[in-house]
Image (cartoon, grey):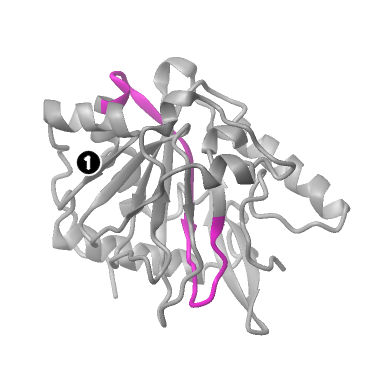
Amino acid sequence: MGIINDQSNMGPTLSSEQIRAWQNQGYLKVPSLFDDGEVCNLDASIMRLEATRMSTDESILHYYEAIGGAKRKSRSERFIGLLSWLDNFILYGKIKAVVEQLFGERALLFKEKINYKYPNGGGFDPHQDAAAYDFGDFHITCLIAPKPTSIENGCLFIAQNEHRRGLLATNSKRCLTKDVAEAMRWQPVPTNSHDALFFGSYTPHYSPTNKSEEARRALYLTFNRASCGNLRAEYYSQRNKSLEIAERHNRKLISTIQHFNGSTV
C-alpha cells in the first residue's frame, strides 16, 4: 500500500466539555479525528518503518521479542526524518494542534514510537510515563492505531482521575507497586482507526497481551511544553546510555522502565 496525496491537516478546536473531561479524567479520546486518507497513509508508513533494517538507517531503533520461538519486532523508535508524510503528520498536523490546546501553549515532540504487539506479544504492566522521563515537567502522549484496538488485542486500560495524585509508589522496575495498582479501577479505552487517544504522563495505564490473531500496531507520540525547550535529543541520548548499561549486564530492555512483560531478545 503506497502513500496517497496528503490533505489539509488543520486541527479541530476542542470544546469546553472536552477540556473538562481531559482535566478530570487524565485522558481524552477524540473520535473520528482522521479521515480515510490519513489512516491509509499512517498504515502504509508504519508498515514501511517496520520493514526498515537498522543497518539501512541507523537513526531508527528497533526492539525485538520472542513469541512462540520466533523473533518479532516489538517496537520501533526515533524515526523522524525518514518519511516526509509521517513527519508532517506528527509535527504539523491535527495531533499537535490538539496537544497544544491541552497544554495551553506550544508543544514540541519529545519522543515517537510504534508498538507492534503481534499475537501473543507481550503487554505492559501498570505504570506512569512520568517515572521514565527525567526531562520536562509534564508530557502528553497521543495513541493512534490504523486498525481498531480492543480488549482482545491489547488496548490501553486507564485508571481515570488518578493523575491528580502525582507520581505514585513504584517497585524496582519503576512500575506501580502491586497494592497501588490493585486498588485502582481500570477502564479499557478501545479505539477505532480514525480516533486519537491523548493521555498525560501522570495518568496510570497498562495494556495486556494481544490475544487476537492479528498484530495490533499503534503509533505513540509524546510531546512536552515548548517552554521547557527541545528535549528530544537529550532524552534519546540518555535513553541509549541506560539501555547500553543494561545490555552490559545481560539485560535486554525496550524502555528505561521495565514495564514490558514480553520476552526481549
Residue 67 left/right relative to 210 = right
Give the image location of residue 91, x and y in percent: 34, 39
Q: Residue 36: which quarter of the image?
A: bottom left
Rendered residue at 68%/68% (across/down): 263
Rendered residue at 67%/40% (across/down): 174
Q: Residue 102: which quarter of the image?
A: top left
Q: Nearer the viewer, residue 78 or 82?
A: 78
Give the image location of residue 196, x and y in percent: 27, 49
Any magenta on residue 173? no
Give the image location of residue 249, x and y in percent: 88, 53
Question: Where is mark 1, residue-wise?
Answer: 94
Q: Nearer the viewer, residue 60 or 96?
A: 96
Rendered residue at 21%/65% (across/down): 4
Q: Nearer the viewer, residue 196 or 114?
A: 196
Give the image location of residue 11, x and y in percent: 17, 37
* Residue 14 visible at all: no
Number of callouts: 1
Extreme-right residue of the structure: 249
Looking at the image, residue 171 lies above or below residue 166: below
* Residue 150 visible at all: yes
User: Dot 1: few (<14), some (14–19), or many (≥20) neighbours within 10 Å?
Assistant: many
Is the N terminus in the top left, top right, bottom left or bottom right quadrant? bottom left
Any magenta on residue 107? yes
Residues rendered magenta in the picture:
102-124
Mark 1 lies on a secondary structure that is helix
The amino acid marked with disc number 1 is: Lys
Looking at the image, residue 215 lies above or below residue 78: below
